[in-house]
Image: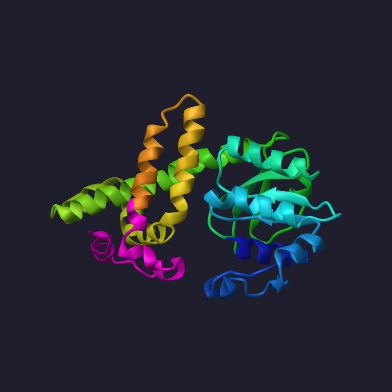
């Protein structure tokens, strides 16, 4: 996601820099087309805007690393991670303690691509500055001046998108184990033919990212609980993704998982 956002902003005319210091060969490959600097300190020293895109569980650590790498310059920080409004408020406090402004952001949709329509929700007093950055395939939408609002949007939309995927994985794995998969798929196809057709790929790709989704489900549970809704549902979703993350299928990178369209094969790979 981060590399695709970088290429989209670069296509819009921005100079985009990043670093792959200490990262995996896969991450280095995904960073193709971006200008690489030796270290995070170099990135922070150069940039006017520093964007964080990482697994939710790492958001605070990354924020601390960015703040620690900041010298006399004062870049605008943009956190696009899938975290609760409360977590985002804590990240803003970390930034503010170092004299830095933070824009809250969240991403809806897949990695941006030329001509695509990935939505980036933004909030905070300087959100408009980020929204004005042109990006091919990015639709920036400011949802308010208050940090936490963009994260609130993500927590609600992701609960539907990723929660629904978890329900499909649970239901179809159960049907496969009990020998009634064909009948279940035929029934579901009456109302959801497109989703049935795409179920194998959808479950495979989600499983390849399941370890990252566990933290996101925890953040959703905390958000819903704070809003007076039941946190137990997404505590359960976190358990679903933790189980998926322990399967053989989780070892596939998302690029390879996207090629696994055979539902029965995908479900077989999820079996204990």
Q: How many marks?
A: 0
Q: Using the image, determine if residue 16 lies above or below residue 131.
A: below
Residue at horizontal 19%, vertical 56%? 176
Q: Using the image, determine if residue 251 lies above or below residue 92.
A: below
For residue 129, side relative to residue 123 (left or right): right
Residue at horizontal 34%, vertical 47%? 240
The reply to whether residue 65 is in sight is yes
Asked if the magenta segment contains residue 133, the reply would be: no
Residue 96, given in percent of the width and then of the height, sits at 76, 41
Tell which of 62 and 146 is nearer to you.
62
In the picture as drawn, the residue positioned furthest to the top comes out as 228
Residue at horizontal 45%, vertical 65%? 254
Magenta part mainly helix, strand or loop? helix
In the picture as drawn, the residue positioned furthest to the front comes out as 68
Asked if the magenta segment contains residue 253, the reply would be: yes
Residue 129, given in percent of the width and then of the height, sits at 79, 48
Question: Which of the 4 image quadrants contains residue 191?
Answer: top left
Q: Give the range drawn in magenta.
A: 243-272
In the picture as drawn, the residue positioned furthest to the left comes out as 179
Residue at horizontal 68%, vertical 37%? 147
Question: Which of the 4 image quadrants contains residue 269?
Answer: bottom left
Tell which of 41 and 149 is nearer to you.
41
For residue 120, side relative to residue 216 (left or right): right
Please identify the quadrant where the N terminus is shown: bottom right
Residue 232, given in percent of the width and then of the height, sits at 38, 33
Residue 169, given in percent of the width and then of the height, sits at 31, 52
Tell which of 193 and 131 is nearer to you.
131
């Amino acid at each position: 996601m981060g590399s695709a956002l970088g290429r989209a902003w670069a296509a819009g005319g921005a100079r985009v820099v990043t670093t792959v210091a200490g990262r995996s060969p896969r991450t280095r490959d995904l960073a193709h087309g971006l200008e690489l600097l030796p270290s995070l300190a170099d990135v922070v020293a150069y940039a006017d805007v520093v964007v964080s895109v990482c697994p939710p569980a790492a958001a605070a650590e990354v924020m601390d690393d960015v703040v620690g790498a900041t010298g006399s310059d004062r870049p605008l920080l943009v956190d696009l991670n899938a975290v609760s409004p409360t977590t985002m408020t804590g990240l803003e406090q970390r930034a503010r303690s170092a004299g830095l402004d933070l824009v809250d952001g969240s991403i809806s949709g897949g990695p941006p691509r030329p001509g695509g329509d990935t939505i980036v929700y933004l909030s905070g007093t300087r959100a408009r500055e980020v929204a004005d950055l042109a990006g091919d395939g990015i639709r920036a939408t400011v949802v308010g001046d208050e940090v936490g609002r963009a994260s609130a949007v993500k927590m609600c939309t992701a609960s539907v998108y990723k929660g629904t995927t978890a329900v499909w994985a649970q239901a179809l794995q159960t049907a496969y184990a009990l020998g009634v998969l064909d009948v279940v798929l035929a029934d579901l196809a009456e109302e959801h033919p497109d989703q049935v057709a795409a179920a194998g790929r959808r479950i495979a790709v989600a499983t390849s990212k399941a370890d990252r989704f566990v933290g996101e489900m925890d953040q959703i549970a905390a958000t819903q609980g704070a809003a007076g809704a039941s946190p137990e549902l997404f505590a359960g979703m976190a358990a679903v993704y933790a189980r998926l993350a322990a399967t053989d299928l989780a070892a596939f990178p998302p690029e390879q998982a996207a090629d696994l369209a055979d539902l029965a094969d995908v479900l077989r790979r999820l079996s204990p």
